[in-house]
Image (cartoon, helix red, strand yellow):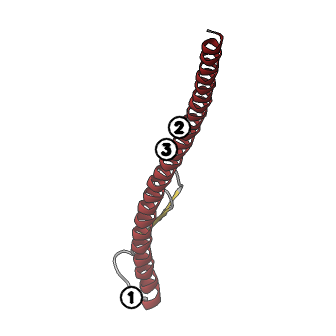
Amino acid sequence: VNGATREQARGSEQILQAVDGMNRMTQQVSGATVEQKKGADQVVKAVESMNRSAREAASATTLIAQSATELQGQAAGLLEAVAFFKDGQPTTRAPQISIHIDRAQAPKLTAAR
C-alpha cells in the first residue's frame, strides 16, 4: 500500500505541474492576444488617418483646380484689358476685371468702365 500511495502522490504531482504549465501558457496566449488587439487597433487608427488625409488632399486638389480655372479666366480678362489700353482703340466699354481669392471670405476687387 505504501508503494501505491507514493506512486499516486507522484502522479498527482505530475498532474499539478502539467496544470501549472497549462495555466502559464494560457496566460501567455492571453497576453499575446491583448497585444495583437492593441496592434490591430493602432493599424485601424492609422488607416483611418490616411483615409482622412487622402480625402483632405482630394478636396484641396479640387479647390486648386477650381482656382486655376478662375485664374485662367482672370488672366484672359487682364490680357483683354491690356490689349484695350495698348491698342488705344476706343470701344464703348473697357473689359471688366474681377479678382477674388476665396469665394467664401476673401475681399473682392472689381473694376469696370
Mark 1 to mark 3 CA distance (whole Å): 66 Å
Left or right: residue 26 versus residue 112 is right
Residue 3 on image: x %, y %: 64, 15
The residue pinned by badge 3 equals 44
x and y, in percent, of residue 19 in the image: 58, 23
Q: Quadrant of the C terminus?
A: bottom left
- Residue marked by disc 1: 89
In the displayed structure, does residue 15 sit left or right of residue 87? right
Residue 8 picture location, percent across and down:
59, 15
Mark 1 vs 2, N-terminal side = 2
Q: In the rendering, at what x and y percent does residue 60 appear?
A: 47, 59
Depth check: give the residue in front, 90 or 55. Answer: 55
Residue drawn at (46%, 56%) of the image:
54
Q: Earlier in the sequence, mark 1 or mark 3?
A: 3
Front-most of residues 78 and 102 = 102
- Residue 11 occupies which quadrant of the picture? top right
Tell me if I can see residue 75 in this picture: yes
Q: Amino acid at mark 1?
A: Gln
The numbered disc on residue 37 is 2
Q: Categorize mark 2 by other alpha carbons within 10 Å: few (<14), some (14-19), many (20+).
A: few
